[in-house]
Image (cartoon, rainbow, N blue to C red):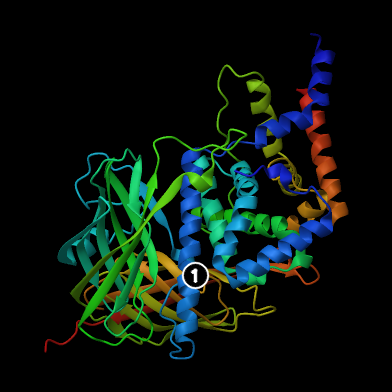
Amino acid sequence: MSTNEWSAHRHADLDVRLDAIYSVAVPVAIATEVDRRVRTAVSAEALIRHRRAATAGRRTRRRTIGALAVAAVLVAAGAMPLFRFFDGWGQSFDRVFELSTPIDQSVTRDGYRVSIVRAYADSESVRLAITAEDLEDRGWAEINIAGVSITDDVGRTYPAEVMAAQQPSRTSSESWSRFRVPEDSTEDRERRLSVDVIGIAVRGATQPTLADGEVDLDRIWTTVDGTWSFAFDLPFILAHSARPGIVATVAGVTVNLEEISVTPAETVGQLSFLGLPERDPDWAWDPYFHVEHDGQRLTVSAMQPGFVTTSLLFRADPGYVNLEGLWVVTIDEFHRTIPDPNSDITTEEESIRGPWVLTWHGVKPATP
Amino acid sequence: MDDARSLGVGGASTVRDDDERMAAAAAQDPQAFLEIYERYRTAVFRYLRSRTTSDDDAGELSAITFERALTGIHRFRPSGGGLAAWLLRIARNAHIDATRRRSGSSRAPETAGHRAPAPDSPGVEDQIILRSLVDALPDTQRDAIRLRFAAVMTAREIGRVLGISEEAAQKQLERGMRALKEAFRVD
């Protein structure tokens, strides 16, 4: 083939070649994980909307986190010891697990045994360590709990937020799930919880496919119907909270560290903002910020709302037993994309640069 | 998975009506959002894969895209170019945000990594050359090419994602294609 013939060949089929480059197949493992995360988010969003409807108007403080925080991580754990590590979970996992209370209740139904091994609770969240086992070894490639519902003895529901799971063997799984304490909760130091595990999710040994040969995502996981019910008393650790009221003003924008709260499991902070330009409430600002305690940078795990004009509640790992130490919250900049007013389409990006540095010294609580 | 090529086919008004119906249903019942997810997940993944360096990153950003879309579905406006443009815009912003956060608020060069083709597959060398040529295009041309071939979008939809008119999107596509053809011939 001459150089000219070769070039003409390339020229003619450029569309085909670009198509071949970008029409990539989605790897099954990736597709399965995305599918799982979105379906988990949908389930959580339904619970969150239900809770909002049920508690609308009762309290004004924003204490709970939306569905953006929801994620489910499935890990091939190999020979890892029971409940030692979950990939994707915050660094405070081990500490919280060690603080949890042994429950050791099991319920067997239709050959599937579900066990609540341990539980932890504080003013912000409840966490459960649950195992699921196929006692009859039906040949599933994976098995997991499909859903969990928690209510307390006065009928309050605790919405599910995050579940991490791993598969120590083909016939069993272990999971560590987090649930939000409802906004209308009281400060009871011990509560009786009713836990229903609703359904067992199973994945077959072979991938189901559609007529065109692509993987049928809708049939990768199927659910074994049933309810595995538990009830137990659980101690609740009260949060330590303070209202520092520290402010910083840069570029006409004032940031206020209104409240900070810690439990052994997590750190929660409330920021408010004054002076952020607002054109459309649907197109708010994305704050780029970080939090440090005694020089250690925390990992912000969730924010509500994710985009801000007047206030922001963040959750971060790790937690602490009290507020003692130096707290520094630094907002580097606010960023947003601006919509076209005629089409609701992003046309440009905008930033307000700081930094806004909020420093506060927490003191050790007095010994009673 | 759905074939991304289903995007953009059929009458525009039919697509718009269907989008409006699906969005309204999802705003009422989160379970209805799964219909949106199932229809557009392939297009979103392919577009994000064209912008990222690994399947894992594209998968993570795909999940973030749909999680954001789920919580913001009430903001969807049918006049804004349809669900495809709306989702791809969220995906694009998610990638921009992720890039910024990783690079400490400054914008990192946007050069996508790609899964290497099998060494013995035909045209491997051409694919590598072509990818690097796309990566070297100006921002808007590069994004227009990716949206056209990864998400199979029309010029109108590309314009909605990039915040430019349909005519401007068409020009960017043509310029990008012309530049690729020129470069490919020279090489």
Q: Position of residue B92 (x, y in %)?
A: 64, 54
Q: How many numbered callouts?
A: 1
Q: Nearer the viewer, residue B68 or A360?
A: B68
Residue at the disc numbered 1: A46
Crowding at mark 1 (Cα within 10 Å: few <14, some 14-19, many 20+): some
For the point 79% across and 47% down, the residue is B9
Residue closest to the far right: B167
Q: Position of residue A292 (x, y in %)?
A: 35, 68
- Viewer-proximal residue among A342 and B80: B80
**Residue lying furthest front:** A110
Q: Amino acid at mark 1?
A: Ala
Q: At 30% across and 84% down in the image, what residue appears?
A: A241
Position of B63 compared to A212: left or right? left
Vertically, is A165 above or below A105? Answer: above
- In the image, residue A145 sits, relative to residue A52, either above or below, namely above
The picture places residue A132, in percent across and down from the top left corner, at 27, 53
x%, y% of residue A208? 50, 38
Of residues A237 and B187, the one nearer the viewer is: A237
Badge 1 element = helix
Where is A349 relative to A180, above or below? above
**Which residue is rendered at x = 67% and y = 58% of the image?**
B89
